[in-house]
Amino acid sequence: MPIKLIDNSPSPRILSLLDKIEFVNTEDGKFFKLSDSTGSEIRVEYIPSFVSGWDVDRYDILLFENPYLTAENDIFQVYESTLGDSRLGWIFPVTSLDSNENDY
């Protein structure tokens, strides 16, 4: 959905219709750029808040997507057979984090 820049003078009119959006990552910073075909643009700075509670050198988070496994109870344990069938972790849908339907 485009963003309209409107002149709110006594006779309002649309100045620009910003219908293109892109994410720009430069040495000066990261921002979203909204623009139109004439070159008018608005930049919105992207300031992510990153809070990490795990050691990134010891653990990985992998995100998988499967359109056929969409139930909240599609939770699977991951085992490694060469390590004596030790459980390494879990595979679960993100929606199960907010669910009361399972007891894992």
Image (cartoon, grey):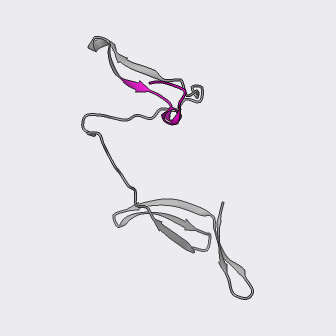
Name, please, the residue furthest toward the bottom.
Answer: 10
- Lateral position of residue 65 relative to residue 9, left or right: left
Which residue shows up at 68% across the image and 83% down it? 8
Name, please, the residue furthest toward the right.
Answer: 11
Which residue shows up at 41% across the image and 25% down it? 90
Give the x, y percent position of residue 92. Answer: 47, 28
Q: In which quarter of the image is residue 18?
A: bottom right
- Lateral position of residue 83 relative to residue 98, left or right: left
Question: Depth check: 48 or 38 in front?
Answer: 48
Give the x, y percent position of residue 28. Answer: 35, 67
Question: Depth check: 26 or 94 in front?
Answer: 94
Give the x, y percent position of residue 81. Answer: 33, 12
Q: Height in image: 50 above or below 5? A: above
**Residue 98 colored magenta?**
yes
Give the x, y percent position of residue 67. Answer: 59, 30
- Lateral position of residue 36 relative to residue 30, left or right: right
| Number of dots carrying numbers | 0
Question: Depth check: 6 or 28 in front?
Answer: 6
Which quarter of the rendering shows the C terminus?
top left
Which residue shows up at 39% across the image and 20% down it? 78
Q: In which quarter of the image is residue 70?
A: top right
Which quarter of the rendering shows the N terminus?
bottom right
Which residues, given as a range, are shown in magenta? Answer: 89-104
Q: Height in image: 81 above or below 37? A: above
